[in-house]
Image (cartoon, rainbow, N blue to C red):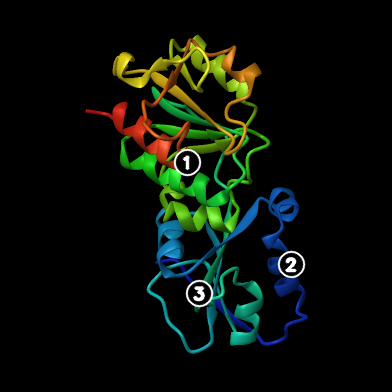
Amino acid sequence: MTMMKTYEITSLTNEKIKHWAKLSQSKHRRATGLFLAEGYHLVQEAAIAGLIDTLILVKGKQIDIETPTIVEVTEEIMKKLCGTESQSDVVAVCRLWKQEGELGERVLLLDQLQDPGNVGTIIRTARSFGFDSVVLSENTVDLTNDKVIRSSQGAIFHMPVYQRNLYKTIDELKQNDIYILGTGLQDALPMSHIPCLDAVAIVVGNEGQGVRESVLKRCDAVTKIEIDGFESLNVAVAAGILCYHFRKG
């Protein structure tokens, strides 16, 4: 059994607390390779994935998770660390997972998405329908954004999710004979006309602008979802329909 180290912090100005509080900012998450997971469910999922560096608990609370280091804090300190109004009793300082690995044969590519709720929901949906990985473009919202993590419901810890250059990723997928399917309205085939391919990468784009033209030019085809009454759907809804259509049987 792993020995756990437990200690207490009571000061809001403690250097560790100030360091962890800065993880609410993307630049500090990128610089340190650390991020926060808040709430019992997400902390449990992070523990299963082996990502927890330090577990932070309100003093007097208990949690059935084994981790090398536990820090007990006051409710004031926990409030400073929590990103939600409904303050939790537990937060985990987690290590970013490795950014290398196989993308697989069913991949979802996110081009310049800015709403963290959309991104987290899409990751959760991709995992639910058997996709192998999700790739965020470099200018998509940070994958360790707390709202991304919360809206993914922990799915982000249990499938490969990367943030990398989309052009290079598409080139890599093509070398592995993966069909690249963009989404858009111009010169697009109805989704019902696209066969359910076993090896496919689907690109969905920014909430307002869609997929960049420079990305669409690298796709093998462009598709659109047939709808009535509106020109387009919310990107998370559209991604859900596409993931279901191309789900693993």
Q: Is residue 180 above or below residue 211?
A: above
Give the residue number, with chain letter if any, for mark 2.
19
Residue ID at (39%, 32%): 132
Q: Quick check: 49 above or below 205?
A: below
Q: Is label 3 in a helix, a strand or a loop?
A: strand
Which residue sits furthest left?
249
Q: CA distance from mark 3 to mark 1?
A: 33 Å
What's the residue at 60%, 53% (across, down)?
145
Viewer-proximal residue among 11 and 182? 182
Foreground mark, 2 or 1, reads: 1
Q: Secondary structure at mark 1?
A: loop
At 36% from the left and 31% from the top, the residue drawn is: 228
Query: What is the x, y in percent for residue 187?
Result: 50, 12
Decide which of 245, 128 is in the foreground and name it: 245
Label at residue 114: none
Residue pointed to by mark 3: 90
Q: Quadrant of the N terminus?
A: bottom left
Q: Amino acid at mark 2?
A: His
Count of numbered badges drawn on the protein: 3
Quick one: label 3 or label 2, which is nearer the N terminus? 2
Q: Which residue, given by chain and number where applicable, does mark 1 sit on?
A: 234
